[in-house]
Amino acid sequence: SHMKRSKVINHPLAPFFILLVLTAVFAVIYTATANVREPVTYLKLLAVTPIPLALPLLATHRGAPCPRLLNALFTVHIFGSVHLGTCLFFYSRISWWDLFLHGLFGALACALFLTLIPRIPYAKSVCILSSLGLGAVWEIFEFTTDLITGADAQGVISAIKNGKNPMSDTVTDLIITAVGAAVYLVFLYIFKKISEKTQKNAKKSQKGIDFY
C-alpha cells in the first residue's frame, strides 16, 4: 500500500539499502564496460557503501531523530562521486563534475556540523574548518589507494605528464570544498533573515487583527 511504501522510503536505513543495491549493480556495469578494471574502483565502492549508516547510528546513540534529508543528500553525493564519477567515468566525461561534487560536499559537511553541534563558540568558522578536515580525509583516502594500487585518482601522474603542478588537483578540491561551505552559510544567513522578517510581519498583522 501507499502507506507501507512511504514508511519504507522514509526509514532511516533506506539510503543505505538503496546504495547497497546500486553498488552491486554498478560493480557489474563497471566490470562489463571498463576497458581496464582498476582494483581501486571496487575498493571505493566497498568503502563508501556503509557511510549512510553513520548518521542513523549516531542519531540513535545521541537519542535524537536522524536528519533524513541530510543523510539522503550525502547518499546522493556518494552516488555521484563513486558510482557515476568513477564507475561511469563522469570525471573524465564532464569537466566540472569533480569541482561540483567538492563544492556540494563542503555545503553538506557544513550542514552536518551545524546540525550535530549547533551551539559552540564561532560555530560557523569551525564549520568551514571541519568541512576542510573531512575533505582532507577523502584526499588522504585517495592518496592511500593510489599508493597501494598505482592508480591516479588525485591526478598527480597526469598533471606531471601535462606539465602542470601535481598538487593543483588536491589544493583546488580543498578550496572548492571551503567555497561550498561558505556558500551554504551565506544561504543559511539569507534564509534566516527572510524567516525573521516573515515572522515579524506575521506578528504585526496579528496585532492589527486583534486591535480591530
Image (cartoon, rainbow, N blue to C red):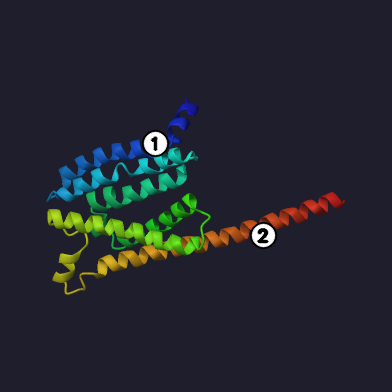
Residue 92 vs 19, above or below: the answer is below
- Residue 211 place in picture, x, y as percent: 86, 52
Mark 2 nearby-residue class (10 Å; few <14, some 14–19, many ≥20) = few
Amino acid of disc 1: Leu
Q: Could you tell me which residue is drawn at 34 percent across and 36 percent down?
A: 17
Q: Toward which corner of the image does residue 147 lie, by quadrant?
A: bottom left
- Residue 205 place in picture, x, y as percent: 77, 54
Residue 103 visible, this orientation: no
Residue 4 vs 38, above or below: the answer is above
Mark drawn on residue 13 = 1
Q: Toward which corner of the image does residue 60 lie, by quadrant?
A: top left
Q: Could you tell me which residue is drawn at 31 percent across and 64 percent down?
A: 173
Tag 2 near tag 1, CB within 8 Å:
no
Q: Residue furthest right?
A: 212
- Residue 27 place in picture, x, y as percent: 21, 42
Seen from the viewer's position, the closer of residues 98 and 67 is 67
Q: Could you tell me which residue is drawn at 29 percent across and 68 percent down?
A: 171
Residue 197 vs 44, above or below: the answer is below
Mark drawn on residue 197 = 2
Amino acid of disc 2: Lys
Q: Could you tell me which residue is drawn at 36 percent across and 62 percent down?
A: 132
In the structure shown, which secondary structural element does the residue marked by tag 1 occupy?
loop
Mark drawn on residue 70 = none
Circle nearer the N terminus (2, 1): 1
Cα distance in 3D space between marks 2 and 1: 37 Å
Tell me if 126 is positioned left or right of 195 in this view. Answer: left
Q: Nearer the viewer, mark 2 or mark 1?
A: 1
Mark 1 nearby-residue class (10 Å; few <14, some 14–19, many ≥20) = many
- Residue 14 place in picture, x, y as percent: 39, 36
Tell me if 160 is positioned left or right of 198 in this view. Answer: left
